[in-house]
Image: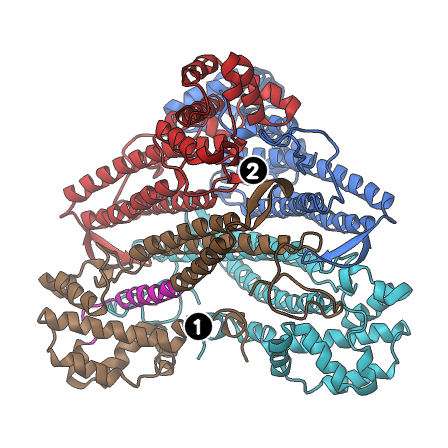
Chain colours: A blue, B red, C brown, D cyan
Amino acid sequence: MHMCPLEWRYGSSDMRSIFTISNIVRTYIEVEIALMVGLARAGMAPAHCIEALKGCAEDLEPHEIYRLEEVTGHDIASLAYILGERCGECGRYVHLGATSYDIVDTSWAILVGRALELVKSKLSKILKAISKLAIEHRDTIMVGRTHGQHALPITLGFKLANYVYELSRSYERLCHVGKRVVKSKFSGAVGTMAAWGEKGFEVEKGASEYLGIEPHTISTQVAPRDGFAELISVLAILASQLDRLALEVRELSRTEIGELYEAEERVGSSTMPHKRNPHII
Amino acid sequence: MHMCPLEWRYGSSDMRSIFTISNIVRTYIEVEIALMVGLARAGMAPAHCIEALKGCAEDLEPHEIYRLEEVTGHDIASLAYILGERCGECGRYVHLGATSYDIVDTSWAILVGRALELVKSKLSKILKAISKLAIEHRDTIMVGRTHGQHALPITLGFKLANYVYELSRSYERLCHVGKRVVKSKFSGAVGTMAAWGEKGFEVEKGASEYLGIEPHTISTQVAPRDGFAELISVLAILASQLDRLALEVRELSRTEIGELYEAEERVGSSTMPHKRNPHII
Amino acid sequence: MHMCPLEWRYGSSDMRSIFTISNIVRTYIEVEIALMVGLARAGMAPAHCIEALKGCAEDLEPHEIYRLEEVTGHDIASLAYILGERCGECGRYVHLGATSYDIVDTSWAILVGRALELVKSKLSKILKAISKLAIEHRDTIMVGRTHGQHALPITLGFKLANYVYELSRSYERLCHVGKRVVKSKFSGAVGTMAAWGEKGFEVEKGASEYLGIEPHTISTQVAPRDGFAELISVLAILASQLDRLALEVRELSRTEIGELYEAEERVGSSTMPHKRNPHII
Amino acid sequence: MHMCPLEWRYGSSDMRSIFTISNIVRTYIEVEIALMVGLARAGMAPAHCIEALKGCAEDLEPHEIYRLEEVTGHDIASLAYILGERCGECGRYVHLGATSYDIVDTSWAILVGRALELVKSKLSKILKAISKLAIEHRDTIMVGRTHGQHALPITLGFKLANYVYELSRSYERLCHVGKRVVKSKFSGAVGTMAAWGEKGFEVEKGASEYLGIEPHTISTQVAPRDGFAELISVLAILASQLDRLALEVRELSRTEIGELYEAEERVGSSTMPHKRNPHII
């Protein structure tokens, strides 16, 4: 039985599917494969081990890793160990010279990148829908208000065009943060690439190209975390803009005002059957 | 496949069991029964409907409610409708005169109350464990530091006793917030008890006594939300205190210092087998 | 020329006067005097040094301290040095065995305590004013709304009584946090009272009684900081309640609704002379 | 006597001078002049009124405005009134068709823009200083740590180069937010430019060019506020990066570690003269 409301009540199935355990583990494996590609290009692993790893990792189930983690207390070490055992003579090249956070941070860059694309695609639909309404209602006169008081006339199209502008600024921010946060990290323990000797940048390049993302310029044991803080801020600002839009609809559907309504019929109250709530669909 | 890490990776099974959908719905039903008790005591429902409701609600599964909610868009209205249908002639007394938030807010008070008891019981164990260590190490000399610099001698017992004091202040706060947040709300639509005529306070009293919790002094359509803000603040302060303790253990187990260690053996790194990380168990 | 809007535009002169540099320094001196009282009671300083210190500290100006701080980089060390120089043979007992944070943390407890009293006294006036209005309007019928939609009738008195209840919960919180935050701290470097030998608790007791506040049960170099976090949370919750009240007045004075107004005449706009904004006085 | 620590204890005089009342009022006047330029270019005010306004506004003191505000309750209306009175026949063109937030929001864009330049210039110095150190210490071997435990060797240059990368990401963010926040707003009451008839965009263009900043694409009564939220986030992230750097210096100057020190001599404690605190200058 679920407990977390994101599992069933809130959120889209598209977004949920990115963050399931099985997709996270699948991404870890994708990154271990990318690393094998990097090692092979740098001449530190046999080229056939790329396909071998793909094969022997294919049916790995998350619970195998997390069962071993109960013993070792370390999820990525458990993953690397299991892949090592499964992949025969190629096993010794799995995770070679890497540190856990090469896998974890690169995986999170990939997952967050996919989530960002979803958010951008939904925001893009909202922008198109509001733009369309703004054009349709370019001449629909309504009262402009400040502090809730009648001020001077505006049009509904003008009101909506302001939301288009403001939300497009969020779209811009989502694009910028994506560039800073969707970056690979292959730099080994403490970030010095020492285990790969002179070949560090080659390993990083090969692995990153395989994944189609740029590596961070430099990193310690872990990739920089500032991008995550920025991401949360950017999403919070977007959420706050959408909240303002929703609140405006709610206010303009007050019984005394009645300028906007929600389209769909819903039960508005468990005790007052006449109620029509300003939920926006 | 889970997605939310609280479902499987973080959190205790005790805490999780409070917030499952099935326990939430079970609590909604508990509150509908309490309301029936209140109605019966006030002479607004036949006394036998209390047992009747218990019976006809017993095997109600959450998915029935949420399937109906997909049509009605209202979860509590769906619950009330299903209970009404199931309970024969007592059906018409189910949810009588109540508003959704009588059920929801009282349920959350109960659930949060149980969660608070769990937190308090764990904090109590931590307080006892640190107190015991503080007494054992009352004479274990160590250096006192300010800004990380050696200052003057202290004892480990003294250091730990400070944590006992600080954490006990959080325990006190948890007790206080509990008193403000664990309160029932039976006041009907817009909070006026109007549907129960002169009998409002009787209904509220009967229902609240059945649940063993005090009602809010007054409420609107919903119970006051300040208690939730306070709860989050109090938990954040507690978390920050525990973070300080954990960080202190981490600092004092630095390789150069080595005054404290974690007891258990764990894999510390996927690439550096000699590492011993200062996780606290 | 001021820059910080709290200096001139926002805030009351009562509140400002608590947090001026000169009052802060005055409070530091008050606490140094309290410490001298504690030392005298414990037999560690001559009794006449209490009056001597009061005298030689009387005309000390903050800029003397902050001028010396520019050299030493330490404000309290500068204060102690200056008092030591000024007070003749009693000079050697000034700040004896204390650490800077004995002075700073005890001073902040005093200052925050005074600020809390101001907030409580203002909140008490608000509570009385709203209670009075609630009683006056106990029979003033108005529409109750949920989601801004007309729902069922209430009275204005009922609406206001809800604010009385909610704000009184903040008053309660202010009382509780005061007990945790207004505490003295006299425990010397690293908090062990070591410089006072066996007499530590006597010094602490004497100094605290002079100030009329209870000491913390135990402290490190500094007093626990959780009380400040709690204080900020409690004030934020109060501010949010007052914001809800102000927003409700604003909404109910919308041109279409016009149920509440601000009493005073003000210029509502630099371009629209007919405007009447819903500021609340 | 000051109360706000930003007035005297924290902050630079450069930054303070931007946000004094007198500079804020000076900027309001700058914007009123820009508006007159816009009006003149659009043929809505005589060209000579630009110089006339500059002259009659020159010696306007903030207290004149705030004295009138005490009567009117509106600062910008007071400013416009006083300028109108002072400027003879040009007085009637002052603030013509504008709303208060044309002045306020454009002024804040200018002020925030200047503050941003200061922050960027300081960050640029920090970046150069750390880069220089990173190059000097490219071969200074030190231990790399994870969780505070010795892990594998790094160089001090490598450690510092990571800070250069991370801080340069903040520099990038400051540039981006500047583009969104430093924008003029000349759109009149409720943002429709209605008072300027067909000439709205001309007024906006003339005024904005005079100030050398781009106007917002569209605005309501006020300019979009998302840029301020973004600005605060970006500064908070920068502060958190600098905090990490400062904390690292503090940790590495622990008595047991002693790898880094602060250069300058300071008094470290009011009671422990041997103390050397890891303040960074």
The answer to which quarter of the image holds residue D36 is: bottom right
For the question of whether residue B187 can be seen, the reply is yes
How busy is the neighbourhood of tag 1: few (under 14 within 10 Å), some, or many (20 plus)? Answer: some
Looking at the rendered image, the quarter that the C terminus of chain C falls into is: bottom right
Percent of width and height locating residue D234: 59, 55
User: Would you say A143 lies left or right of A197 here?
Assistant: right
Q: Is residue D219 magenta?
A: no
At 64% from the left edge and 70% from the top edge, which residue is drawn? C265
Residue placed most toward the observer, A118 or B144: A118
How busy is the neighbourhood of tag 2: few (under 14 within 10 Å), some, or many (20 plus)? Answer: many
Residue placed most toward the observer, C276 or A202: C276
At 60% from the left edge and 81% from the top edge, which residue is drawn? D67
The chain letter for the residue carrying disc 1 is: C
The residue to which callout 1 is attached is C16
Specify the label residue D130 is tagged with. none
The answer to which quarter of the image holds residue C70 is: bottom left
Considering the numbered disc 2 on the image, is that residue within a helix, a strand or a loop?
loop
Residue placed most toward the observer, C118 or C204: C118
The answer to which quarter of the image holds residue D114 is: bottom right
Percent of width and height locating residue B226: 46, 46
Q: Is residue C95 magenta?
A: yes
Q: What stretch is highlighted in magenta?
A: C94-118
Tell me the kind of residue under disc 1: Arg
The residue to which callout 2 is attached is A186
**Please, is residue D202 above or below residue B199 in the view?**
below
Percent of width and height locating residue B179: 35, 41
Percent of width and height locating residue D51: 81, 84
* Distance from the alpha carbon under mark 1 to that under mark 2: 55 Å
Q: Do residues under tags 1 and 2 come within 8 Å of each other at their CB atoms? A: no
At 87% from the left edge and 77% from the top edge, which residue is drawn? D45
